[in-house]
Amino acid sequence: MSDSKFTIPVVQELLDSELSERSPVPSLQEKILAIRNSLRPGQQQMADWQSGPLAISAVPGAGKSTGMAAAAAIAIARQYERSSFRRQLVVVTFTRSAAANIKAKIRKFLRDDLHLPQTGFFVYTLHGLALNIANRHSDLSGLQLENVTLITPTQSHRFIRTAVEQWITNNPDRYLRLLEGHQFDGEETERLRRQSVLRTEVLPELANTVIHEAKSSGISPELLRKWSKQTTDEYGILNVAAGLYEQYQNLMRSRDFIDYDDMILAALRVLENDSARRVEQNQVFAVFEDEAQDSSPLQTQLLEILASDAGDNSSLLTDAIHRVSTADSCTDAMNRVSPNSALNLVRVGDPNQAINSTFTPADPIYFRQFCEECDRIERLATMDRAGRSTRIIIEAANFALKWINNQWLAATNNKQQIPDNRQVPFRLQTIRPVEAGDPQTNANPAPIGRGLELYTPRDIHHTVDLLSQRVVELFGEDPTKNSAAVLVRENRQGRWLTEALTSVCKEHNIILYDVGERDRRSHVPQEILALLQFCDRPHSPDYLKAALEALVQRQLIPTQDLNALASLPEEFLYPGPLAAPQLETVQKAARLCRSLLRARLELPLYQLISFLALTLNYDQAELATADKLAERVNQQIAGNSSMGGMLSALSEIVSSERFEPVETEDSEERYTRRGQLTIITMHKAKGLDWDYVFLPFLHENLIPGRFWVPPQSQFLGDFTLSEVARAQIRATLHEESVIPDVSQAWEVAKNLKTSEEYRLLYVAMTRAKLLLWMSAAQKAPFTWSKPDNLQEQAPCPVFPALKRQFPECVMNLAVMSKQA
């Protein structure tokens, strides 16, 4: 809807106030007006909110966080005017770093612009909000936090592996049907191969996918079984998934483990209770949600209930609670939004930056529906002006969006129809440059060079040559002046690039920061495990060598021939009087190892991890991570405390969980430092920006890519069970008339992946401020696990279209090579 259609009475009140006779000290209304007038039109619409539902659809670089912080501060200020009873504003965002960022901005507005106390609001991640509610009402939530352990399981986690084995034992006939696949001659070697594939790959992947999809939507195993009766596939995929899900839930309950979805469910159990719900709602006057396109159905329900008035008996609230208590499928809640709704909920997001729905339960369809329903009642604002990028980058991103949608509609023979929000990858939303006089410093800056540079190198090695040459030119004599990043589709590309660029960056004093390598540093659990295994079995050559490697890595002992030391552990640790004299470097290593063994004997078991962290000379963040690890392990082995139990728990964490380190430094700052070339995945780059952005390796086999059925599991068919199940579950949640069969579900899954990959490219393109460098080499690896196996690769379909649309940005490599 246009800005002119969006009107709220408060604007006129503020203008009247400004025109009235004023005292020398500005009134609160005048301060509010000053903040509002400093904002862009879309941000002003958010600041004008007073009550009811409001959707904000924002383009990349539009200033979402600044607009939300200003709107939050204004909403808090109005609460000061209205009553002596202070209810709180709840602000919810996606990550801890984003929460810290928006909290700081709200405080600044309250302190510097409004001269009010920096109170009246809370900022949470969604899971942090849920845990807070569940913890305050532990009798209702069923969560006794001192007794439960929070995990983030992967498909290799022992609970999922055990659930698979238990399901196989309990369902021999269904397992045999999977084993037979499309055809099977009974040959024993093939039987064993298929058994291994099913037990270690297919069924764990199905379990992991469906558990997250179902739990995040409030779906029980019983409801999955009910849905499975509406399907006719030969394997009964949803029925198999329901059985795996049920086994997993039983295992979690028996061990007092919870996952992140359990936290949301626990909070919703609290809000089922009338008294507890009123208590929670009476503390909140509104909920502001950032990154709303990444919400799952249950998260949306939680915010809807919390944002409803305590006395509200509307169908929206009643139905939301009904869905929680019955685990029924999610209906289209937003069809009940009305101008007079008591739902005080402001949701801000960008449907075109929804890039998590094919590997997490996030589903952008719900935010799109919210936007449509709010538009219908004239409660939709669009933040479409962005000052981040130079104009040529904005034009390229807008062109890519429209071109992809047009190609999509042409391919589906739908071009003459008005598409619904499930048919096209993008919401038709154009980025516009800011207007003259915009408060942003250096908004829509002048481009560097052509602003957009399109390259077609011979191969990936030529790509590195061109990229490194451009990096050196851009950083120039003062490497600390600008920021730059190479955005890759997968971490394997990042590792290869880091090796290729290290020498060039070192020569020109450019810091090279591989985010993937740093993020892979679950090194704290791994190093602690290595030292503990050595303490438990010091005479094992393997464990001794692993411990020595950790000590060398931490620069606590000099680099030396560790194989020679580890081959004779007793002689190394406790040399006898007849042994040859040890070198000083060996003596230092032996003394440190003996001190570890002495600590094992003298310290209580629960103190060992903290002691080892200090021995390894960890920094502040690593020590905090080690404390978190120690608390987790000690909690897990409580009641059965032993070195064996500790090693088992720690091994499980290292091998099959994503153990998140404690970060004491703002991660966004680390990624965007000046004088640094950051190598980062496109997914991780969301929400960040750099002066120069490089997008190499833009090939069709990765973007948009295609679903690939591993050869080892093709005996089941030309599809994967996990993606078929995901598509069937989402079709039911979207209230489609029938659950798609296997072939239809596989097509839906492929379309969802294609859409998301294109949105990922759009996100990557819009990270650049001054220069966007894009390339698609003629030869590239088919798989980046074998980067030396080069072959002809087609470019991402958008890339040739960009070259045709922006011919002046196509770089002439022949001329460049002559100049070089």
Image (cartoon, rainbow, N blue to C red):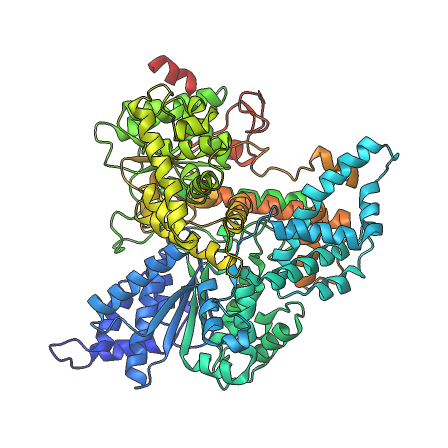
> Which residue is drawn at the image coordinates 67% and 47% (left, top)?
204
- Extreme right residue here? 185
- Extreme front residue here? 577
Location of residue 619 in the rendering, given as x and y in whole percent from the top left corner:
30, 45
In the image, 215 versus 522, the foreground residue is 522
Q: Where the C terminus falls, by quadrant?
A: top left
Q: Is residue 327 found left or right of 537 in the rendered image?
A: right
Residue 576 in view: yes
Q: Is residue 486 found left or right of 418 in the rendered image?
A: left
Q: With respect to residue 77, does 219 lie above or below? A: above
The image shows a total of numbered marks equal to 0
Q: Would you identify the image quadrant in which residue 569 lies?
A: top left
- Extreme left residue here? 24
Q: With respect to residue 470, does 650 lie above or below? A: below
In the image, 294 versus 636, the foreground residue is 636
Location of residue 470 in the rendering, given as x and y in whole percent from the top left corner:
34, 26
Residue 59 in view: no
Q: Is residue 371 found left or right of 728 in the rendered image?
A: left
In the image, 637 versus 706, the foreground residue is 637
> Which residue is drawn at the image coordinates 51% and 79% (left, top)?
341
> Which residue is drawn at the image coordinates 33% and 42% (left, top)?
615
Q: Is residue 433 found left or right of 651 in the rendered image?
A: left
> Which residue is drawn at the image coordinates 26% and 63% (left, top)?
38
Q: With respect to residue 268, does 644 lie above or below? A: above
In the image, 632 versus 307, the foreground residue is 632
Q: Would you identify the image quadrant in which residue 391 lies?
A: top left
Location of residue 621 in the rendering, given as x and y in whole percent from the top left corner:
33, 49
Location of residue 441 in the rendering, given as x and y in whole percent from the top left corner:
24, 50
